[in-house]
Amino acid sequence: MATQLGTFGVHRRSGQLTPRFAAEIEALGYGAVWIGGAPGDLDLAEALLDATERIAVASGIVNMWKYDATMVAGSYHRIEARHPGRFLLGVGIGHPEMTTEYRSPYEKGVEYLERLDDAGVPVDRRVLAALGPRMLRLAAHRSAGAHPYLTTPRHTAFAREILGAGPLLAPEQKVVLDQDAERARGIARRTVANPYLRLVNYRTNLLREGWSEDDLAGDGSDRMIDALVLHGDGAGAVRGLVAHLEAGADHVAIQVLGDDALPTYRSLAESLAC
């Protein structure tokens, strides 16, 4: 039984999520809550599901280096028994700058997914963080699909071509609703420049996507920041979100930057007719 995510979801870091927030997001009509940097015990996912009735919860992502696959599988089965069909396990390999044990991401991904197989986690109930061609193909063959992070619709089109027509493609997209371009870029840069522009996996993917070394220099060029973090009025943000769907996404996980994100999620929900 594949987890139903709807067309638009909400992406927040684990420390920003509460059961009350999830209940409000559900009431607004969003299809899923994605937990950024999800702890492997999945206690937070269970708490969000306990507080809601229909919305899906997904981990975006559980780090393969940090959390043992057998332990994570046990957490998955606990949640599945309590909330059948409502949880999607997102896993990923993280970054070499943050993991002393880091080695081949592909080999680690294959090994981890095999261990999830052995522990009985269904292929259609897990998704893989994937950016490059090899990991995208692994996501297509060994999971429900891919959850790319820090990308644009250009990458979404690239990913869909590699995944093919069937697998799930659920990119994350950052948003700041502010019509003052300089102020919006300031908020965006504080999130994007550090750490993401300092991490080799994201830098490599942005270069692959067509951005230049000049775009990545310092805290990022205006044009790249504007693409990675949608800003302006609600209509402009909606166009940017829909562009992912037009490029081949099935679902878009919206990450509103800032501590008080609910007003923006309310505004977007009305515009997107969630």
Image (tube, rainbow, N blue to C red):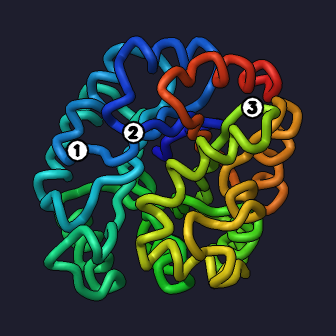
Residue 85 in picture, x, y percent from top left = 41, 36
Q: Of callouts 2 and 1, which one flags the residue occurring earlier in the amino acid sequence?
A: 2
- Amino acid type of disc 3? Asp
Tag in front: 1 or 3: 3
What residue did someone put label 1 on? 39
Q: Of callouts 2 and 3, which one flags the residue occurring earlier in the amino acid sequence?
A: 2
Mark 2 to mark 1 CA distance (whole Å): 11 Å
Mark 2 to mark 3 CA distance (whole Å): 21 Å
Instruction: Tell me if I can see residue 143 in this picture.
Output: yes
Tag in front: 2 or 1: 2
Q: Residues within 10 Å of mark 2 (few under 14, many from 20)?
A: some
Kindly state the secondary structure of the residue where label 1 is placed.
loop
Please tell me which residue lies in front, 110 or 267.
Answer: 267
In this rendering, would 266 be left or right of 144? right
What residue did someone put label 2 on? 13
In this rendering, would 239 be left or right of 144? right
Q: Residues within 10 Å of mark 3 (few under 14, many from 20)?
A: some
- Amino acid type of disc 1? Pro
Kindly state the secondary structure of the residue where label 2 is placed.
strand
Instruction: Tell me if I can see residue 7 in this picture.
Output: no
Residue 129 in picture, x, y percent from top left = 45, 64
What residue did someone put label 3 on? 178
Residue 44 in picture, x, y percent from top left = 26, 30
Q: Are marks 2 and 1 in contact (CB under 8 Å)?
A: no
